Amino acid sequence: MAGRVSMRDVAAASGVSPATVSFVLNNVAGQTISPTTRKRVEEAARSLGYVPHGIARALREGSSRIVVLNIGQNLEGNYSQTYVRGLGDELARHEHVLLVQHQELTDDSLKQIQDAVSPRAVIRFAQRYLTGHELDDGGWQSGLASHTAAQIGHLAERGHTRIAMAIPEDRPPLSTVRLHFAEETARNLGLAPLQPFFIPASRRDAARALEELLAENGSITAVAGFVDETALRTVKAALDLGLRVPEDLAVIGYDATPYGELATPALSTVHIDAEAHGRHTARSVLGLAVDDLVTQTAHVIQREST
Amino acid sequence: MAGRVSMRDVAAASGVSPATVSFVLNNVAGQTISPTTRKRVEEAARSLGYVPHGIARALREGSSRIVVLNIGQNLEGNYSQTYVRGLGDELARHEHVLLVQHQELTDDSLKQIQDAVSPRAVIRFAQRYLTGHELDDGGWQSGLASHTAAQIGHLAERGHTRIAMAIPEDRPPLSTVRLHFAEETARNLGLAPLQPFFIPASRRDAARALEELLAENGSITAVAGFVDETALRTVKAALDLGLRVPEDLAVIGYDATPYGELATPALSTVHIDAEAHGRHTARSVLGLAVDDLVTQTAHVIQREST
DNA sequence: CTGAAAGCGCTTACAG
DNA sequence: CTGAAAGCGCTTACAG
């Protein structure tokens, strides 16, 4: 605490009480401060370089101006990147700071964080996705549903009617919802029922699983990946089976990692800008209005794999 | 603060003062507490579910038990993953919590974090890498130097003597050090001087740049990537030029992302386990001993690209 | 229009 | 062996 300048210092320098300093600096409503006092305090604060002590404020107010985002390891895609950026920016704009937690969020670790940080909020990444609390009508405008529809729609446009969706074998939480929306899209588009394809992590097993899938559903001509990685795994499996991509099997990724472009064949994918989603989360967590937020719609990047 | 049980509550329940509760629960040295009192306090704390309020403690002690790690977007590789895991685990073991900050760390944002969180420490990812403060003799035992040596060494073992290192055109901070160690390794191994290859981000430009590199240094037969992504970009450029990988040009990645295995040809790479590095950082930041930490040595995963 | 006082939950000299 | 008191830096009823 050595060199720290506190409210007391500002009060002393401007000849008022700490209470008044607090009123001025926080623009407390319902207080009538004379313009001269206000000026004096503001100037003193500035010239002393006063900056409020977050911890003290947090103790008094019951929670800090920190927001914790819990997120897994999956930060590769464009969705997460832009989401985190939007969330962080918007929070900063309202004088909060975003801190990310990458460990698994258990009841214990959540409690530990609560106790250590007293954050304003703890956000689980993609929670709104998972719970269906989307910005708009079920997410078909600019949410997960619309992104999934863009992915399946691209395949349909290219003439595919029998489509599978590749999901990692350990079935991440989001996969249920993605699958659900994909099925619905296939129905809406009059395609054959969408086929789930649970793809193993090992290269050898993946090839075998794909072989089975195609044996049982010979007419499948295209696969939509849960994310880029899943799609690339599918491509590799197809190649390992001696199939040509996209001639024998078209594959599209999801969420535009940098790796899709570098693959051979280069991966088509869905590009999602989630900055507005991040901002939305920030605002709702702070209890602010969200009406003026406009969401980018997703677009397909077509490369060589479809 | 509604349901919170505080030290006062524990004190009341066990019939002692808050001071005594603090002494007992923190095992304060130089205090002689009767075993019975100690028992009583500990039991009361347990049965009430008391857990210290981090913010209050932080206010009193001057800093919180939070450690902030500043890290860019690059969380794909095995190094970062294991580093973050080790750091987080070790911190948790010593009752601290790790929070990650992904935005660019400017003087301003650093100050904002200091003021909002009063963290025990702010760590910049790979700082020790950058400054050469390695665990051992300059990092040749188990640090960056040894990892780079493993990468170049693999190429040398496969008979390559004229090697380039591919670095992203925007030259990330770490690249200087990597290049330095690679050059030194090439010298130690009696290879031709290592050639830096600054590779553009766009696919077309990358191919053109690689073409130039090979025109000017026709005898180059292998490229070591700054990271997997750089290596994959190089592979793609080579393929775009009609070269065969590895026959015409061998390429090895660095830091084992999940994407290397999925590429065609599958990418050889260096696998680094940095959990001990993470633990080391945690310990030194907390001022604890680090002698018993044993670091895994890196190993090469050979696949199809070398 | 402004100030004195209490209190958020903890730790640590100091006193007994 | 244990407790009363001060104080970390802030905010907010309450009083004037």
Image: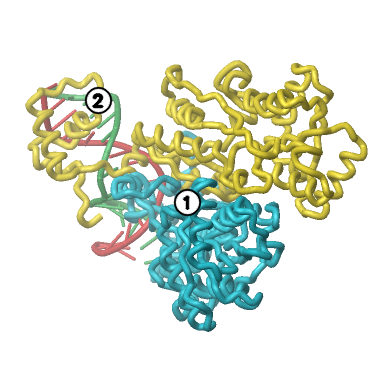
Chain colours: A yellow, B cyan, C red, D green
**Position of residue B11 in the picture relative to residue B49 (left or right):** left
Q: In this picture, is C2 found above or below A2?
A: above
| Quadrant in which the C terminus of chain B appears | bottom right
A141 or A24: nearer the viewer: A141
* Same chain letter for marks 2 and 1: no
Give the residue type at disc 2: Val
Residue A144 percent location from the top left of the image: 62, 27
Q: Does dot 2 land on a helix, a strand or a loop? A: loop
Residue B113 percent location from the top left of the image: 35, 47
Give the residue type at disc 1: Pro
What residue is shown with label 1?
B200
Q: Residues within 10 Å of mark 1 (few under 14, many from 20)?
A: many
Q: Chain of mark 1?
A: B
Q: Does dot 1 land on a helix, a strand or a loop? A: loop
Q: Are marks 2 and 1 in contact (CB under 8 Å)?
A: no
Residue A169 percent location from the top left of the image: 77, 45
Residue found at x 21% / y 32%: A25
| Disc number for residue A28 | 2
Q: Which marked residue is nearer to the observer: mark 2 or mark 1?
A: 1
A66 or B264: nearer the viewer: B264
Residue found at x 22% / y 51%: A4
Q: Chain of mark 2?
A: A
Q: In this picture, is B47 found above or below B275?
A: above
| Disc number for residue B102 | none
Residue found at x 53% / y 57%: B211
B278 or B186: nearer the viewer: B186
Residue found at x 34% / y 38%: A60
Residue A234 visible in the picture: yes
Q: Quadrant of residue A149?
A: top right
Q: Quadrant of residue B198?
A: bottom left
